[in-house]
Image: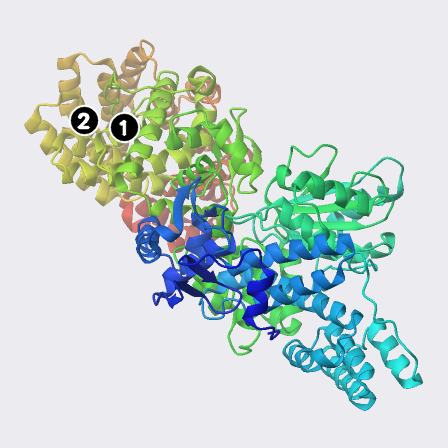
């Protein structure tokens, strides 16, 4: 770089380096010397830390910044411990000459006076400002010579950190270059043309696109009598600019060229003030050629900015949303559209707010003031003074200011104009609610159509159209996030033979999806990680805890329970403000529910997976306890209490800040709303060793949940609890769960249900658990009935035990089972009195579902006995009981039997309607046995009405698509009907 020798520096700097002290040099390679001897620092990570601290000497460098510079995207498991190890090594190397302290979440280095070349550089530039204010150009030139002599080459070129060279080195390099340009302007102004030619030539070669250096070189050559060389400099730079950038030389370069051609004299005099050019600037990033969609948002933002010329208003527009949703792209797109409305310029600055180290307001103001014509050494020092200077520079001008990636309102406030005319467009992951009178636009992910449109812009449109279903799947798997779709497009574009469906299949694996959504420097995970690092500790905790919840919507109290035991309102508020959570509407209980973006949920799950298992266990324990208290309140209010009753709720379980009475007021609504969360909590409790609480929760919530079907999921969850209890050696809990699981298996797999019941019977006999034994004996009796092997032995034993214990619930269940067995043995006349006895007991207990089931079976007996009036009155009673509790599945079973009654009455159209409605409800409930029987009732009605072809079609479809082999009794019935339909 400029070749002024070091003696000039020593003479010009204030006092020179202190003898015997350590010296740091960063304006070139990184160098540390003590008493003139080189201090060897060979470990690269130690060099990275030292360079980072020296660049911000006297200011805290956050831990997150250091971690990013040391390890980029692959940090070790314990980053803080590793970082502390390297800092300790650095402290030993530096000794007492430089103090490194841990403060406010980061490290700071305190340096002795005049011990770092960057400090000297700043002091010298301050001397330049003072000298120019006094009108002493010679003194200003000496200071500039000394400052530029400190610049020894590319800044920190021997420190290997991409993040460091991306975030801080360019600004220092630019300051050094600007100082050199100013120095040569003064050299020429003071007549030193020939003396600086070679230095100028070398620096211009190093920075070929810096037009001011070429202008100074042409002036120096021309005033030294070397006109031909000066003209060659112009020809060379003009050719370079056209070839490399497609641009012509700037106006100042062209003016000097013209003056040389005409042989005119030229003014070499430097300005006495220290302002830079104040020409109109457009700092916007390039317009985005493949921008798609967002038509409504674009129109809304343009409209919000349209008040730029109205008196006394400064339009402020905030675009917020999750990382990768396209905020910056939309802001740049809109900014280019409205350029003509802001003829005095368009300023753009990235505030770095999404990461752990948002840019300081003084630094940003300095950048903006420089763009507006005020050179750094002429700028005031305090943030208040710089903000005032900025407002003065933009006053009464029409400038669009784009502030990209803002951290918070505090960062933005000093950057706002004070008078009308200009407008501000801000992007942030946060909603910046503290900014008054701002128009806010929250960006949502693309629609599927917009996602397809973006892929079609990046890829060959015919390729996307040819695999449209796979393309739509890719859009959904990317969460319709523009960043993720651009990554997918970038991966597919250079590989034209890679099928979209192949990549879609890879993305289906949730554990690998974030790995797949990365290409080059673009990665969804790293974008989310940068944002996470910038969150406050409580918000980070809430995001990690959110990763413990299933990928479903949740209420605030759910997140609060698993986070810190609170009500969760503050947690969801902060996550929403950070763009990490969205409200999805009110649930059936009137509570607002929330859900993260799909990719945010995957990232949160990764974060949660890194937590200590004891911490995770405690979090799930709080959630489980909250669910248990609420489920207990619901259990006391539900009508369906068949199955084994739950054990007593432990005394040490606390509800926490949740409205139990309000949530449990409508038990069915709460259970439907929280079904996924409840079943997930049960499985997680088993995984973490709390099988007993899992069993208690299952016994309270699964019987009423089964009204709505979903049998396969319930069977799986019951099996998980059973296996966890067996693993713990708890035979009682394991067998209770096995018997309850078999209840549901009666509708799915009779053989497995019978096996579970038989094993449970043996255990309960041995443990003398009478209530559980009655439950399992009656279940085994039902399994044998549906297998086509009805026998009274199990029902009779259950009845004997029930009467011996006097438990009314057991008596009702045993009598009902006994009656069912008699019906299947074609003995309805014997079954009817048993049902009446059971109904008499049922009226004394609160069990609506048992009451309904008894009435349905009595209806069936009445039809079989030809007592149609009794059947009609029984149906009316059963319908009243069923409708009272909104039991959709129970109504399906009632309609199955009512179809038979309608057929017996000769009302075949009504019989068919009932059968079809019953079939619809059975399908919704996921009850295969119910589906089979509803189809049989439909076939019977069709056959009775003479529609043999319709009945045959129903039966053929039924036998070919259903697992009839698992229900022999029903299979035999279907085959008999098919024979009648085929051979009437």
Instruction: Name the disc covering residue 932, or none.
Output: none
Q: Element under label 1?
A: helix
- CA–CA distance in space, label 1 to label 2: 9 Å
Closer to the N terminus: mark 1 or mark 2? Answer: 2
Q: Residue at x 63, y 69 (%)?
A: 458
Q: Secondary structure at mark 2?
A: helix
**Quarter holding residue 562:** top left
Pointer 1 local density, CA inside 10 Å: few below 14, some 14–19, many at least 20: many
* Whether residue 102 can be seen here: yes
Identity of the residue drawn at 45% across and 56% down: 68
Q: Position of residue 153 (x, y in %)?
A: 55, 72
Q: Please identify the quarter of the rendering in which residue 769 is found.
A: top left
Check disc 1 and report the residue beneath it: 820
Residue closer to the observer: 616 or 66: 66
**Residue in front for this viewpoint, 746 or 684:** 684
- Give the answer, above or below, for where 495 lies relative to 981: below
- Which residue is outermost to the left? 766
Q: Mark 2 = which residue? A: 795
Locate residue 642 relative to residue 445 in the image: left or right: left
User: Toward the viewer: 500 or 311?
Assistant: 311
Up-down relation of residue 615 to residue 854 (above or below): below
Residue 777 left/right relative to 340: left
- What residue is at 53 percent from the left and 26 percent from the top? 591
Quarter of the image for the N terminus: give it. Answer: bottom right
Residues tagged 1 and 2 counted as in contact (Cβ below 8 A) = yes
Left or right of 207 on screen, residue 19? left
The answer to whether residue 641 is above or below residue 212 is above
Q: Residues within 10 Å of mark 2 (few under 14, many from 20)?
A: many
Residue 342's spot in the image, x, y percent?
Answer: 85, 52
Between residue 490 and residue 815, name the one nearer to us. Answer: 490
Residue 104 position in % (x across, y down): 44, 39
Corner quadrant of residue 300: top right
């Amino acid at each position: 770089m400029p070749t002024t020798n070091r003696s000039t520096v020593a003479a010009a700097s204030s006092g020179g380096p202190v003898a015997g002290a350590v010296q740091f040099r960063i304006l070139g390679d990184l160098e540390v010397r003590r008493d003139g001897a080189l201090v060897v620092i060979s470990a690269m990570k130690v060099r990275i830390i030292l360079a980072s601290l020296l660049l911000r000497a006297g200011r805290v460098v956050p831990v997150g910044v250091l971690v990013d510079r040391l390890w980029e995207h692959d940090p070790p498991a314990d980053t803080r411990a590793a970082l502390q190890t390297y800092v300790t090594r650095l402290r030993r190397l530096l000794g007492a000459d430089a103090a490194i302290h841990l403060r406010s979440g980061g490290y700071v280095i305190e340096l002795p006076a005049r011990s770092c070349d960057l400090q000297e550089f700043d002091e010298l530039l301050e001397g330049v400002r003072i000298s120019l204010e006094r009108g002493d150009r010679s003194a200003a030139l000496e200071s500039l010579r000394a400052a530029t002599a400190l610049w020894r080459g590319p800044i920190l070129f021997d420190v290997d950190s991409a993040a460091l060279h991306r975030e801080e080195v360019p600004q220092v390099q630019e300051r050094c270059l600007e100082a050199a340009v100013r120095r040569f302007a003064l050299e020429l102004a003071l007549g030193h043309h020939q003396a600086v030619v070679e230095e100028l030539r070398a620096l211009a070669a190093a920075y070929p696109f810096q037009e001011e250096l070429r202008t100074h070189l042409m002036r120096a050559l021309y005033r030294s009598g070397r006109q031909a060389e000066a003209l060659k400099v112009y020809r060379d730079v003009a050719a370079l600019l056209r070839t490399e950038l497609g641009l012509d030389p700037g106006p100042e370069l062209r003016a000097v060229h013209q003056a040389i051609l005409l042989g005119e004299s030229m003014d070499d005099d430097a300005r006495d003030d220290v302002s830079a050019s104040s020409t109109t600037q457009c700092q916007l990033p390039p317009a985005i050629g493949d921008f798609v969609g967002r038509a409504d948002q674009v129109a809304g933002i343009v409209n919000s900015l349209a008040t730029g010329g109205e008196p006394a208003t400064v339009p402020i527009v905030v675009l917020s949303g999750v990382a990768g949703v396209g905020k910056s792209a939309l802001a740049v797109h809109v900014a280019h559209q409205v350029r003509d409305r802001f003829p005095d310029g368009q300023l753009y600055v990235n505030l770095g707010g999404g990461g752990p180290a948002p840019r300081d307001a003084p630094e940003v103001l300095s950048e903006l003031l420089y763009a507006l014509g005020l050179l750094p050494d002429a700028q005031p020092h305090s943030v208040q003074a710089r903000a005032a200077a900025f407002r003065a520079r933009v006053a009464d001008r029409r400038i669009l200011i784009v502030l990209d990636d803002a951290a918070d309102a505090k960062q933005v406030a000093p950057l706002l104009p004070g008078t009308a005319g200009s407008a501000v467009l801000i992007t942030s992951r946060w909603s910046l609610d503290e900014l008054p009178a701002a128009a806010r636009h929250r960006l949502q992910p693309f629609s599927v159509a917009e996602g397809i449109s973006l892929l079609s812009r990046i890829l060959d449109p015919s390729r996307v159209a040819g695999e449209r279903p796979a393309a739509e799947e890719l859009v959904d798997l990317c969460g319709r996030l523009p960043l993720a779709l651009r990554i997918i497009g970038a991966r597919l574009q250079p590989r034209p033979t890679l099928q979209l469906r192949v990549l879609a299949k890879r993305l289906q694996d949730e554990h690998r999806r974030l790995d797949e959504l990365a290409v080059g420097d673009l990665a969804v995970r790293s974008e989310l990680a940068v944002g996470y690092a910038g969150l406050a500790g409580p918000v980070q905790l809430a995001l990690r805890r959110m990763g413990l919840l299933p990928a479903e919507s949740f209420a605030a109290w759910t997140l609060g329970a698993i986070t810190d035991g609170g009500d969760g309102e503050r947690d969801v508020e902060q996550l929403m403000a950070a763009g990490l959570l969205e409200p999805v509407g009110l649930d059936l209980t009137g509570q607002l529910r929330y859900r993260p973006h799909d990719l945010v949920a995957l990232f949160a799950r990764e974060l949660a997976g890194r937590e200590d298992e004891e911490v995770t266990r405690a979090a799930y324990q709080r959630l489980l306890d909250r669910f248990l208290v609420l489920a207990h309140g619901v259990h006391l209010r539900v009508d369906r209490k068949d199955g084994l009753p739950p054990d007593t709720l432990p005394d040490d379980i606390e509800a926490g800040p949740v409205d139990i009475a309000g949530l449990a007021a409508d038990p069915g609504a709460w259970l439907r709303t929280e079904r996924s969360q409840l079943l997930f909590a049960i499985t997680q409790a088993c995984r973490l060793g709390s099988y007993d609480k899992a069993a208690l929760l299952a016994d309270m919530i699964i019987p009423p949940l089964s009204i709505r079907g979903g049998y396969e999921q319930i069977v799986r969850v019951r099996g998980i609890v059973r296996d966890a209890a067996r693993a713990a050696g708890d035979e009682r809990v394991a067998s209770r769960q096995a018997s309850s699981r078999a209840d549901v298996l009666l509708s799915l797999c009779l053989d497995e249900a019978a096996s579970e019941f038989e094993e449970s019977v043996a255990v309960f006999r041995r443990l003398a658990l009478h209530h559980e034994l009655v439950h399992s004996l009656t279940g085994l009796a039902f399994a044998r009935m549906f297998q086509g092997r009805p026998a009274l032995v199990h029902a009779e034993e259950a009845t004997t035990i029930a009467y011996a214990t006097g438990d009314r619930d057991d008596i009702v269940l045993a009598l009902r089972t006994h009656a069912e067995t008699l019906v299947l043995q074609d003995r309805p006349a014997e079954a009817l009195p048993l049902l009446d006895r059971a109904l008499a007991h049922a009226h004394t207990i609160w069990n609506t579902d048992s009451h309904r089931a008894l009435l349905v079976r009595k209806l069936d007996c009445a039809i079989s006995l030809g007592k149609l009036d009794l059947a009609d009155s029984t149906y009316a009673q059963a319908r009243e009981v069923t409708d009272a509790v909104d039991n959709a599945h129970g109504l399906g079973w009632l309609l199955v039997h009512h179809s038979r009654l309608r057929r017996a009455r000769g009302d075949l159209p009504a019989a068919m309607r009932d059968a079809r409605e019953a079939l619809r409800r059975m399908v919704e409930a996921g009850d295969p046995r119910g589906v089979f029987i509803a189809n049989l009732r439909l076939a019977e009605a069709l056959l009775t009405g003479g529609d043999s072809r319709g009945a045959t079609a129903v039966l053929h479809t039924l036998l070919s698509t259903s697992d009839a082999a698992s229900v022999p009794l029903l299979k035999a019935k279907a085959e008999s009907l098919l024979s009648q339909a085929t051979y009437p």
